[in-house]
Amino acid sequence: MALIEWTDDLSVGIEIADIHHKKLVSMINALHNAIIKGYSKKVMENILSALSVYTQKHFEYEEKLFETYNYPEYKEHKRQHDNLKKQVLEFNEEFNAGNTMLSIKLLDFLKSWLIQHIVKSDKKYAAFLNEKGVK
Ligand SMILES: [Fe+2]
Ligand SMILES: [Fe+2]
């Protein structure tokens, strides 16, 4: 079973954002799968680095929208993105340094971060943008 099941509760009502979020969910699930199947460190490294690149791109996409539409909570939202980016970098470093206990801690963290962030913060900007006609 996948670690995170995509349900419509996670949809924010902006098509591209939903596509990005689904991809992030599937990458976290891939990492989970790699861990439970005991795939090599190299495989996990690849997933982690792809996840970190994709996350970066997704955040840039959202932040660009905030700028374009003068989203009032831009700063607070970006702060959340920046914290996550910092965390992922730290995890990457620990992982590369051979911390084997990292994986489960990392997965729990990523799962709850992503779900909380989508449901609380992304839905908030999406509602604001929906009102401006962005779908
Ligand atoms: Fe966000
Ligand atoms: Fe997002």
Image: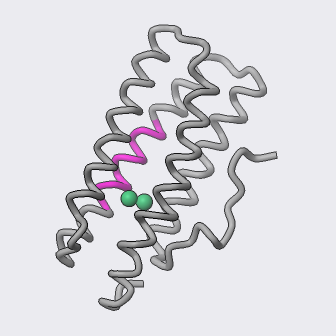
Left or right: residue 99 versus residue 92 is right
* Relative vertical location of residue 51 with respect to residue 117 in this rendering, above or below: above
User: Where is residue 70 drawn, in percent x and y?
Assistant: 17, 75
Q: Which contiguous range is marked in magenta?
A: 50-61
Decide: is 8 above or below 118. below
Q: Quadrant of the C terminus?
A: bottom left
Instruction: Indicate whether residue 53 is drawn in magenta.
Output: yes
- Closer to us: 124 or 11: 124
Q: Please tell me whether residue 87 belongs to the stretch shown in magenta.
A: no
Q: Quadrant of residue 33?
A: top right
Q: Quadrant of ligand 1?
A: bottom left
Name the residue located 78 percent from the left edge and 26 percent from the top edge.
37
Q: Is residue 26 left or right of residue 127?
A: right
Residue at x-position 56% and y-position 72%: 11
Q: Residue farthest to the right?
A: 1
Residue at the spot 36% in from the left edge and 28% down from the top edge? 89
Please tell me in which quadrant of the rendered image residue 103 appears: top right
In this view, which residue lies farthest toward the top?
A: 98
Task: Give the x, y percent position of residue 73.
Answer: 25, 67
* Location of residue 16 with respect to 57 vertically, above or below: below
Tell me: 118 left or right of 35.
Answer: left
Specify whether 39 is left or right of 97.
right
Q: Is residue 4 above or below residue 89?
A: below
**Residue 22 picture quarter:** bottom right
User: Is the image coloured rainbow, by chain, by secondary structure, or in one colour?
Assistant: one colour
In this rendering, the count of numbered labels is 0
Name the chief secondary structure element in magenta.
helix
Residue 13: x, y in percent? 50, 79
Query: Where residue 15 appears, x then y in whole percent?
Result: 48, 76
